[in-house]
Image (cartoon, rainbow, N blue to C red):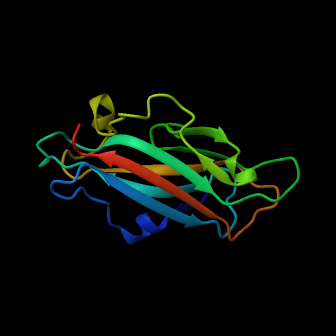
Amino acid sequence: MTTYNSNKCLAGVQPRLLPSAGGVNALSLYTQNPALATNDLVNMLNLVSDSSNPNGQGPTMQGITLDTDQLDSGGSAAIVLSLGDTALSTRYFSSISLGKTGGYAIPTTPAVLGYQPFGGSYFATYTTVSLATYTIILKCNTAAQTAVTTAQIRLATEYTYDP
């Protein structure tokens, strides 16, 4: 298993809410090169908690969209992906074959809208209250039969710090 990073995670900068803005939209990009193997991970986006925020400890998810080029040009077998986090690898998408033909999808699992990564008992898994990091992770469950190594994976994430 290898772990890769999207452009947002490589940059090391978390998208932030600007004063008087309602929400944040972040687009993360990852180019498959080399081909993803079974159990490989791609860190797509880091979100940060912020104890100085008067409205809460972190982001509230408003939407998430996965868009891929064709990642697998092979026969009937297909690359299978999931999207989640370190606690639950299928939090947003569970075993989808979107990469076989390429395309655009919204979450395939329930309770994404309004999800608060730093809320409730889940927050206890982080080491600090202020500026803890939550990473959205793409997991390759099944490798491509014939990988397209220049294919791109895009993740559009919408969230707010105003619960």
Total label count? 0
Residue 72, x across and y down, in percent: 77, 57
Q: Quadrant of residue 161?
A: top left
Does residue 117 lie above or below 21 as drawn?
above
The residue lying toward the viewer, choosing from 9 and 92, is 92
Residue 138, x across and y down, in percent: 55, 51
Could you tell me which residue is drawn at 75 percent across and 53 percent down? 101
The residue lying toward the viewer, choosing from 30 and 22, is 22
Residue 96, x across and y down, in percent: 66, 41
Does residue 5 lie above or below 160 as drawn?
below
Q: Quadrant of residue 15?
A: bottom left
Image quarter of the C terminus: top left
Does residue 107 lie above or below 75 as drawn?
above
- In the picture, measured across the screen, residue 149 lies left or right of residue 68, that is right
Image quarter of the N terminus: bottom right
- In the picture, measured across the screen, residue 76 lies left or right of residue 86, that is right
